[in-house]
Amino acid sequence: MDKMRILFVCMGNICRSPTAEGVMRHMIRHAGLDDLIDVDSAGTHGYFIGAPPDPRALVTAQRRGYDLSDLRGRLLVPDDFERFDLLLAMDFTNLDKLQTLCPSQYQSKVGMLMGYARKHKSPVVPDPYDRGPAEFERVLDYIEDACSGLLRALEHSSVVLG
């Protein structure tokens, strides 16, 4: 069986989407699902191609046991719509960009990460870039919640059950 491939998408790929990639990668590893699910992240804008995650995102994630140090910003490319099974936006601006760029046959792959959240009712993961450390903590709270819900959904789907 092919791996389920998930792409997390935000604007610059240095705060929210790499955090989601790191959190989900950690959860997948601890669930023993490395052979079944693969994750990546990308940005809709090329501001930070090749850059590591924002230092505030790195520190916040590290305090909770997530390692983002090997991640580097990359730009969403047209091939991503074919290669990935799910492309999950962090907010409505990036969802709109994904939907605009996405070929019609792949539109069903595009969605919102927070649609999987169980505890937090926000429809979006807010952009912490111009804010302080507390906002990075809140972003990580939202991402942990949504990634946990996403993993539960995958565990109860044909991805894991075959």
Image: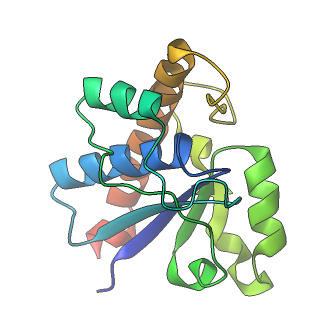
Colour setting = rainbow
Image vertical order of residue 63 relative to residue 33, above or below: above
Image vertical order of residue 134 relative to residue 72, above or below: above
Camera-nearest residue between 130 and 6: 130
Q: Quarter-wise, where is residue 123 in the image?
A: top right
User: Going 45% across and 44% down the picture, which residue do you hit?
Assistant: 53
- Residue 40: x and y, percent? 43, 63
User: Going 33% across and 78% down the picture, which residue do you hit?
Assistant: 3
* Quarter placement of the C terminus: bottom left
User: Going 63% across and 77% down the picture, which residue do you hit?
Assistant: 77
Camera-nearest residue between 103 and 31: 103
**Is there any visible trace of residue 119 in the rendered image?**
no
Camera-nearest residue between 72 and 98: 72
User: Going 48% across and 37% down the picture, which residue do you hit?
Assistant: 54
Residue 41 vs residue 35: left or right? right
- Residue 62: x and y, percent? 28, 30
Residue 132 vs residue 65: left or right? right
* Quarter placement of the N terminus: bottom left
